[in-house]
Image: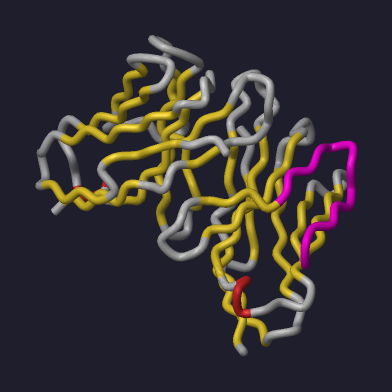
Amino acid sequence: EAAVTQSPRNKVTVTGGNVTLSCRQTNSHNYMYWYRQDTGHGLRLIHYSYGAGNLQIGDVPDGYKATRTTQEDFFLLLELASPSQTSLYFCASRTGRSTEVFFGKGTRLTVV
Amino acid sequence: GEQVEQRPPHLSVREGDSAFITCTYTDPNSYYFFWYKQEPGASLQLLMKVFSSTEINEGQGFTVLLNKKDKRLSLNLTAAHPGDSAAYFCAVTASSGSWQLIFGSGTQLTVMP
């Protein structure tokens, strides 16, 4: 079973704070994704990547940066956190040959 | 771009009854379709994936229907039990080369004993 590990699992920060969410997959998957989940919206794509050094903009990218440092690691950066970014964040990955997407357990971020 | 509408947002049924959830999508070229289950505090678990060439898929205790003409994807949980209580999400792949998953807004299902 493919594994996607997110850290931290919970994070509280203040408005204007700097936050980094981490995601690691050890499945040699090419594609990695960051989603946010909010009530009434399902999951919305923030950023995604085809591989190390590659970054693509998703549907709700404003206020977020991302970096794919290696095949395994994908980071989501909030440089000036705002209360509107309080959400549950999921990382996911998949190979280039499969349609199946594997999700991490999520990071709950609260911006006060 | 692709838009996915899911109904109902909340659904409450008695144990043994059926629970029916529907998604409509806008892109006629969408090709892959998914149903996910999310239990409280947990990640998303893939229930089933279907392709545009299939119309009916049966799993353990549920049936997925795909109507390409109406651009409608449905999940029917037959004889629901309390363990089925969870949030359910449909997802559709965009037809563009980026292969993004576009999710419905979810259905919170409660199965009462």
- Taking depth in this image into account, of A96 and A81 the one nearest to the observer is A96
Which residue is painted at 32% across and 47% down in the image?
Answer: A107
- Taking depth in this image into account, of B52 and A51 the one nearest to the observer is A51
Which residue is painted at 61% across and 32% down in the image?
Answer: B1
Q: How many marks?
A: 0
Where does the N terminus of chain A fall, quadrant-wise?
top right
Q: Is residue B59 magenta?
A: yes
Q: Is residue B12 left or right of residue B18?
A: left
Residue A34 location, quadrant: top left
Instruction: Tell me where residue A79 appears, x and y as whole percent.
Output: 17, 30
The structure's colour scheme is secondary structure
Q: Is residue A12 left or right of residue B38?
A: left
Instruction: Tell me where residue B44 appears, x and y as whole percent.
Output: 53, 51
Q: Is residue B16 left or right of residue A67?
A: right
Extreme residue toward the bottom, this view = B113
Q: Is residue A53 left or right of residue B59?
A: left
In this view, B10 is above or below A68? below
Which residue is painted at 25% across and 51% down in the image?
Answer: A10
Which residue is painted at 84% across and 37% down in the image?
Answer: B52
Where does the C terminus of chain A fall, quadrant-wise?
bottom left
Residue range highlighted in magenta: B48-61
In this view, A93 is above or below B92? above
Instruction: Tell me where residue B109 appears, x and y as whole percent.
Output: 59, 72
Instruction: Tell me where residue A44 appears, x and y as whole percent.
Output: 47, 42
Q: Is residue B100 magenta?
A: no
In this view, A17 is above or below A106? above
